Amino acid sequence: MLQLDKITKTFGANTAVHAASFTVDKPMMIGVIGRSGAGKSTLLRMLNRLTDASSGAITFDGLDITALRGRAKRNWQSQCAMIFQQFNLVPRMDVVSNVLHGTLNRRSTLSTMFNLYPDGDIHRAIDILERLGIAEHAPKRAEALSGGQQQRVAIARALMQDPRIILADEPIASLDPMNAQVVMQSLRDIHEQDGRMVIANLHTLDTARRYCDRVIGMRDGRIVFDGTPEQLTTGTARDIYGADASFSEATTSTQIETNEAARKILADIAAL
């Protein structure tokens, strides 16, 4: 289904992702974990073709994604929806119009300029908002919503694309714990109910263990762990985050850099 073969991305003398390889044979929910700067975001951006790989290949159902250009590339991006940490909504635009932006790849320039949408698309957008529990906010400006609600609008926009893959780049990093749970459960439900593949970059091991079927750990641009949440041991945590480094990324999203946090996460994993 999805295969990465020694995919690499360099920026000048720096290598952000080094020879990353893995295969996904069926739709599942995958968490990509690691410290800030480990290459997680760059990996997702190469999957979506927001950035080009320096070498290696990405294939999906036999299609060479890395070779796509022009319209073929845009078609792939509509099939591989991206959700960002900062939501990327139009703040002064109403919620339902933000969701309808998920159809831009298949609409004419004229209809886009005049903000014209078919009734069927409007009804579908509202249905998706209803599914995510925020339909009552459809006429409001996006900027009037809480962070968790805005992220659900971003998820709804992604679903409007009717994608085969949803990529979520740190979708809960700026959310409080309650909203983070709602967003992660929404992504989990989309995977289970729709049969879509979901790949999410995550800071916390707890989140990966709770919501994901498979976890990929990255360190310094390399994949150092690929397995089930149950296989996340103290040793693998050290491989991912470093034996002497702070584990704040693994324990919270608040960037508290303390050695005590490192010791705690190791103890929590060892107790599993």
Image (cartoon, helix red, strand yellow):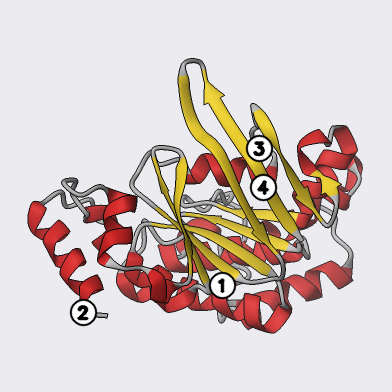
**Residue at which label 3 appears:** 50
Instruction: Tell me how far mark 2 sits from mark 4, CA to CA.
Output: 33 Å
Residue 86 locus on image (x, y percent): 47, 50
Tell me where residue 271 sits by quadrant.
bottom left
Q: Dot 3, how many residues are within 10 Å of its Cα: few (below 14), some (14-19), or many (20+)?
A: few
**Badge 3 vs badge 1, beta-carbon distance below 8 Å:** no
| Relative horizontal placement of residue 4, taking residue 206 as reference (left or right) | right
Q: Dot 2, how many residues are within 10 Å of its Cα: few (below 14), some (14-19), or many (20+)?
A: few
> Residue at (31%, 67%) from the top-left corner?
176
> Residue at (60%, 42%) from the top-left corner?
45
User: Can residue 30 be seen at all in this image of the molecule?
Assistant: yes
Q: Amino acid at mark 4?
A: Leu
Q: Amino acid at mark 3?
A: Leu
Residue 123 locus on image (x, y percent): 80, 75
Of marks 1 and 2, which one's residue comes earlier in the chain? 1
Of marks 3 and 2, which one's residue comes earlier in the chain? 3
**Badge 3 vs badge 4, beta-carbon distance below 8 Å:** no
Q: Compared with residue 192, is residue 38 higher up or lower down, i.e. above or below?
A: above
**Residue at which label 2 appears:** 271
**Residue at which label 4 appears:** 4
- Marks 3, 4: nearer the viewer: 4
| Relative horizontal placement of residue 136, taking residue 66 as reference (left or right) | left
What is the secondary structure assignment of the residue under circle 1? helix
Instruction: Tell me how far mark 1 sits from mark 2, CA to CA.
Output: 28 Å
Of marks 3 and 4, which one's residue comes earlier in the chain? 4
**Badge 3 vs badge 2, beta-carbon distance below 8 Å:** no
Q: Amino acid at mark 1?
A: Leu
